[in-house]
Amino acid sequence: MRPEESQASVVRALTRLGWEVRKTPSAVIGSHGKHYVMVSFEGGKPSSIIISYVGKGGGLLSSKWRGSERLPTPRKVVEALS
């Protein structure tokens, strides 16, 4: 069983992976150019992740939260949405 994850642990994980990170009360958002990763929180626990590209042809992927060990690097997101 994995320990409960918090906004602070998600911020640390995204920062380690190379994302520029900011927090809101209900989400942690990582950015890399026009690519974004947003982890949404409900009741203080991560609930879902949205990966997006904002630009011509844009793209969007979303899924339930599966743990910070499964967060993508900016490079993986660029490859997936290119």
Image: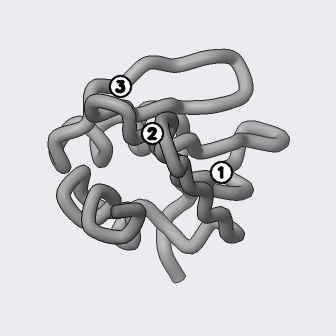
Identify the mark nearer the N-term, 2 or 3: 3
Q: Is residue 32 left or right of residue 66?
A: left
Sort mark 1 into few (<14), some (14-19) or many (20+) by Cα contacts within 10 Å. Answer: many
Q: Amino acid at mark 2?
A: Tyr
Q: Secondary structure at mark 2?
A: strand
Sort mark 2 into few (<14), some (14-19) or many (20+) by Cα contacts within 10 Å. Answer: many
Identify the mark nearer the N-term, 1 or 2: 2
State whether residue 61 is above or below residue 38. Answer: below
Which numbered dot is residue 21?
A: 3
Q: Amino acid at mark 3?
A: Val
Q: Which residue is mark 2?
A: 36
Q: Secondary structure at mark 1?
A: strand
Q: Amino acid at mark 1?
A: Pro
In front here: 65 or 81? 81
Q: CA distance from mark 1 to mark 2?
A: 16 Å
On the image, the x and y values in percent for residue 25 come to 70, 17
On the image, the x and y values in percent for residue 49 come to 61, 55
Sort mark 3 into few (<14), some (14-19) or many (20+) by Cα contacts within 10 Å. Answer: some
Which numbered dot is residue 46?
A: 1
On the image, the x and y values in percent for residue 39 come to 59, 45
